[in-house]
Image: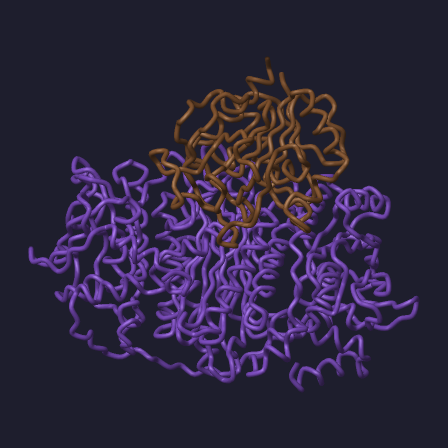
Chain colours: A purple, B brown
Amino acid sequence: MFPHEENLIRERLGKEPNEVEKAMLEVMWSEHASYKSSRPFLKLLPTENEHVVLGPGEDAGIVKFDDETWIAIGIESHNHPSAVEPYGGAATGVGGIVRDILCMGARPIALLDPIRFGPLEGERNRYLFQGVVKGIADYGNRIGVPTVGGETEFDESLDNYVLVNVACVGIMRPEHLVHSYVTEPGLKLILVGNRTGRDGIHGVTFASEELSENAEEEDRSAVQIPDPFTEKLLIEATLEAVYTGKVRALKDLGGGGLTCASAEMAGKKGFGAVIHADRVPLREPNMAPAEVMISESQERMLFAVKDEDVGEIGRIFEKYGLEWIVVGEIIAESRYVVLWNGEKVADLPIDLLTDVPTIEWEMRPHSLESNAKTPNIGFKEAFELVWGSPNVVSKRWIWEQYDHEVQGRTVLKPGRDAAVLRINDEYGLAFVADGNPRHSHLNPYQGAMGAVAEVVRNLVSVGAEPLALVDNLNFASPEMPEVYWSFAETVRGLADAAKAFGLAYVSGNVSFYNEVVDRPIKPTPVVAGLGKVKLEEIPGMGLSDGLLIGVIGVTRRELGGSELYSVLGVEGGFAPKVDLGVERANAEAVMGAVRAGLVKAVHDVSVGGIAAALAEMAVAGCAGFTVDLSGVPAEMDNPIEVAFSESHGRYVVAFPEENLDALRALFKDFAVIGKAGGNEAVFLWNGMELMRTPVARLEEIHESLPKLLGEEG
Amino acid sequence: MVRFAVVVFPGTNCDFETERAIRKAGAEAERVWYKTSLKDFDGVVLPGGFSYADYLRAGAIAARQEIMEEVKEFAREGRPVLGICNGFQVLTEAGLLPGALRPNKTPRFICKWVHLRVADGETPFTQFYEPGEVIRMPIAHAEGNYYADDPSKVRVVFQYSDEEGNITDEVNPNGSLLNIAAVANERGNILGTMPHPERASDRFLGSEDGLRLFKSMVEWARR
């Protein structure tokens, strides 16, 4: 809290808050709990359209899939805890977002984990990477929610730091929707789940500050302890309770602990609450009232039920062996009162906890874009650097540790452009997350639009009609004018791109202060998207013998922030620009081609450019190809730049020759560049050979992550 | 119609899809909380997951719950008892199947599709497979490394193989003795399998090879 905020509290309260009140105000007024630097900007994001049932404002957003099926979706970050304690930080991040979905009354059915680290050459970065992956795996596997995709990036700006985002979707019937706020007084508040300990004390405050050099020693107590077994029982017990129709409101205990959950549940519609803090079952002896009220111990939920229903709901918790107590009740007066052994230890107007004023920081526009020269390098050398980069190689090592098939819904498994989960006999839900901090670093507005465009391309590539978006904004300190400006530009980009596609954001998360000792991270907006796909219509991604290979979209000299420039150490350049009209037209045309069954394989072009996209399609289909890159619709004539540019709006498709005319009629910028077949990948330029390599060799390099981790010779 | 119980322990997480697969195979199926009686059922399935969070050893605590007395009764009477993944671990821990499931040779959880060779097509669970046939199913486990003191006494049902049915070290995902993926008791009415047949029971999920296992079981229970 800043000094001016402390003064404001004193003024509004008319006295100095006592110790318990101060602790509660501290967490509620933290950046992480109140979004005080971001709220004014987030208002710019579109949040409504025909698919949106419930937009931002509760624990998760709700999207209509069909008349009987709604989808709950949310996204969260657990960056600070994961940087200090990777296993526990990542695991509890999964637990938190799963409970956000659960408390809408939905069954969590899938997770995505966009994760980012420093270079794998660094020993500590490897430790953080392996710890995060194991944390996500152990937690997700044990609660039986499949992790079906994500993103993994390595970037030197994240040396000794991590970004751990996680998105979750849940499935529900409309009649099971439960809100996170109460609309009547007199309800009993039931606290159920894990005992409360000293773990996660001031977790949100800690997440609202940059990490110091000694964070690992100093901040471990702010990291929560994961307990997936209890979470699994909570999932089943909560859903069973929800299905009784007797749950009046439901919230998980996340950031800000009991204080935040109960104050928000009571205060949203102007009611108040009395909390008997001494009744909370404790994991450790002699905890003070303030500690009990702000602990962020995991796997706890707060239920509001009518007095006469307490027994029935309690018996459900007992069936699952979960500890529960009536911790307080909702009152008509809009005050927040904490009792300890019958004695009042805190008494505040509830809106002092929940209505936190916003802060607008100074902004300073800046640009890192500049002309950059592509080094003179051989095609084969450039290809091997890009194709073998940790950012491009297969992430199989990660996803094989995740039970990505539990629940029996995973139609498209990790490794494809988007995951698809079977919803019924006919339709599936596509789910994907994207972000490109290197593009955002050069141009935050274009980088943000690019993230949305890539989400749309990925959904379309699996034949899915995009339905809704969520965003997770990872930034350094908003107190730095350049950072705050890049944040504002990012939100503007997210808003413009979504509007162009007619899409809305139904939920989101902001994480500021991502920096270690004054080294700010790149602006990292991560966008996750949902789509609806007819299961019969899902195209493949792999090449097969005899298919023609076509490229959709124009390739521009946009190598700023590309994988090629990164592996060659080239600074500057220009970030790829999104032409929203073209992006939308190409997405619609690809959807048309998929629905008409004209294409056998579709893959979007992103990191690594057309060269990487083609190689991925070859490996996926175990088939070679011969392409002439001079045939790619492009504004330059340097084969290296054509192959590795990361311009937006592009797809590679493979199709039988008889569909060529129909496809030509669908697309504005379209060219056939070659044919699939054989067991070699052959790149030509005006008929001259640039490179020839066996598909088996491509695959070997693609599967080299274990080697990069030092696991195999 | 024959009815199968799908036993749910605290931490079980493959119960819904197992119930779905059994129904698809033509029987009634019901998820049964582990404190409920199994009377009125014709067969019992112990599905995958992390019963009791795999505290102590995978399956060890579930194997000592009261409901397992009823499962043993089923087994004695010759009715079908199927354990999938964690269910297989429970069956070995309960002494209903020989051997033990140790941590994978690479001590990590591993989720991937594998090829299996049908070593025994004569059990009630495999009558719809050809002996020697190669099928596809996914595995998802951290402790699936099968071991038995005397493998000659084990009735091996599935073995990890390559696409052609060759049993080699390269295609052994977890270090199991003789690439063993599934075993039955001598009588054949108890089957433990590490691969998940319920996840290979729908063409959209990649294969229907697993559905035949449930169909075999249902058909046999019907007789």
Using residue A196 as the reference point, say whether residue A175 is left or right of it. left
Any part of residue A173 in sight: no
- Give me the residue at 44% from left, 53% from top: A432
Any part of residue B40 in sight: yes
The relative height of residue A294 versus residue A135 in the rendered view (above or below) is below
Which of the 4 image quarters holds residue A122? bottom left
Outermost residue to the left: A687
Of the 4 image quadrants, the one containing the C terminus of chain A is bottom left
- Give me the residue at 45% from left, 33% from top: A426
Residue nearest the observer in this picture, B79 or A695? B79
Using residue A340 as the reference point, say whether residue B30 is left or right of it. left
Of the 4 image quadrants, the one containing the N terminus of chain A is bottom right
Using residue A14 as the reference point, say whether residue A60 is left or right of it. left
- Give me the residue at 76% from left, 63% from top: A196
The relative height of residue A134 versus residue A574 in the rendered view (above or below) is above
Count of marks placed on residues: 0
Residue nearest the observer in this picture, B180 or A619? B180
Residue A327 rendering spot, x and y as whole percentages: 83, 58
Which of the 4 image quarters holds residue A341? bottom right
Residue A254 rendering spot, x and y as whole percentages: 66, 62
Residue A189 rendering spot, x and y as whole percentages: 80, 55
The relative height of residue B12 versus residue A648 in the rendered view (above or below) is above
Outermost residue to the right: A342
Using residue A321 as the reference point, say whether residue A76 is left or right of it. left
Residue B39 rendering spot, x and y as whole percentages: 74, 23
